[in-house]
Amino acid sequence: MSEQLTLALSKGRIFEETLPLLKAAGIEVAEDPETSRKLILPTNDPLVRVIIVRASDVPTYVQYGAADFGVAGKDVLLEHGGEGLYQPIDLKIAKCRMSVAVQEGFDYASAVRQGARLRVATKYLNTARDHFAAKGVHVDLIKLYGSMELGPLVGLADAIVDLVSTGSTLRANHLVEVEQIMDISSRLVVNQAALKIKRARLQPILAAFEKATRAMA
């Protein structure tokens, strides 16, 4: 009997933008995670199921084999470290950028040039640390899980490092983007053991994802 495959996805943009890729592989998810309370969703293929997990947990589920493959943002993978994961395809979905932002009127260029110690609020500690270290800027990193924009407004931080898509949230909170660190998109990640053991099942899906990604480019 063929073994079941488990795909880890997070709700929202990644889920929505993965659906066309799944469809290209002949897989359709039977329920919408926004309306269903289920965390394990069936598909039209009885041997493929989707589990809905927090975006930051996708690499962990795949690394430990609770999911055979998943879709995770480059931001999440950089923080996770990518240990035990095969990352065959940049799916070019859920695109945004990792940026530094400050409150309007804050002289970021001057602060950085003078070698001042900056307080930076972020949930992307590794990315922020590497970025400022490469610039030779001393920073105190403050880990937050949500509403980064509030940090500079209430004096918690001088700057934030966060994902930016349209920039509307920054503008609404009187923050400005002062530096772009990197472009972000989502990648397919595969459990290394599953790739060997379930190769016959996984390979056609990976090939379909790759073909669909090229077609959308």
Image: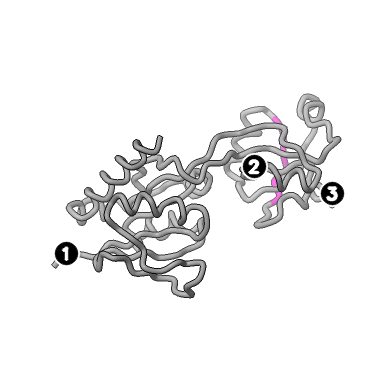
Q: What whole-number distance in Å separates the C-alpha atoms at marks 1 and 3?
A: 57 Å
Q: Residue at x 83, y 31 (%)?
A: 107
Foreground residue among 149 and 14: 14
Circles 1 and 2, Cβ within 8 Å, touching? The answer is no
Q: Residues within 10 Å of mark 1 (few under 14, many from 20)?
A: few
Asked if residue 140 lies in the magenta stretch, the reply is yes
Spatial distance from mark 1 to mark 2, Cα to Cα?
A: 44 Å
Which comes before the other along the chain, label 1 or label 3?
Answer: 1
Per the image, label 1 sits on a secondary structure element best described as loop
Of the residues shown, which amino acid type is indicated by label 2? Answer: Thr
Nearer the viewer's eye, disc 1 or disc 2?
2
Q: Helix or strand or loop: what does disc 2 sit on?
A: loop
- The answer to which quarter of the image holds residue 50 is bottom left
Q: Residues within 10 Å of mark 2 (few under 14, many from 20)?
A: few
Give the Cα separation between the discs numbered 3 and 2: 25 Å
Q: Nearer the viewer, residue 191 or 172?
A: 172
The quadrant in which residue 176 appears is top right
Q: Is residue 165 left or right of residue 26?
A: right
> Disc 3 marks which residue?
155
The residue singled out by tag 1 in the image is 2
Mark 3 crowdedness (10 Å alpha carbons): few <14, some 14-19, many ≥20: few
Q: Is residue 79 shown in magenta?
A: no
Q: In the image, what residue type sits under mark 1? A: Ser
Determine the residue positioned at 65% across, 57% down.
145
Q: Which label sits in the foreground, 1 or 3?
A: 1
Say which of 63 and 190 sits in front: 190
Which residue extends farthest top? Answer: 113
- At 43% across and 58% down in the image, what residue appears? 9
Viewport quadrant of the N terminus: bottom left
Q: Secondary structure at mark 3?
A: loop
Query: Magenta residues?
Result: 137-142
> Majority secondary structure of the magenta segment?
strand
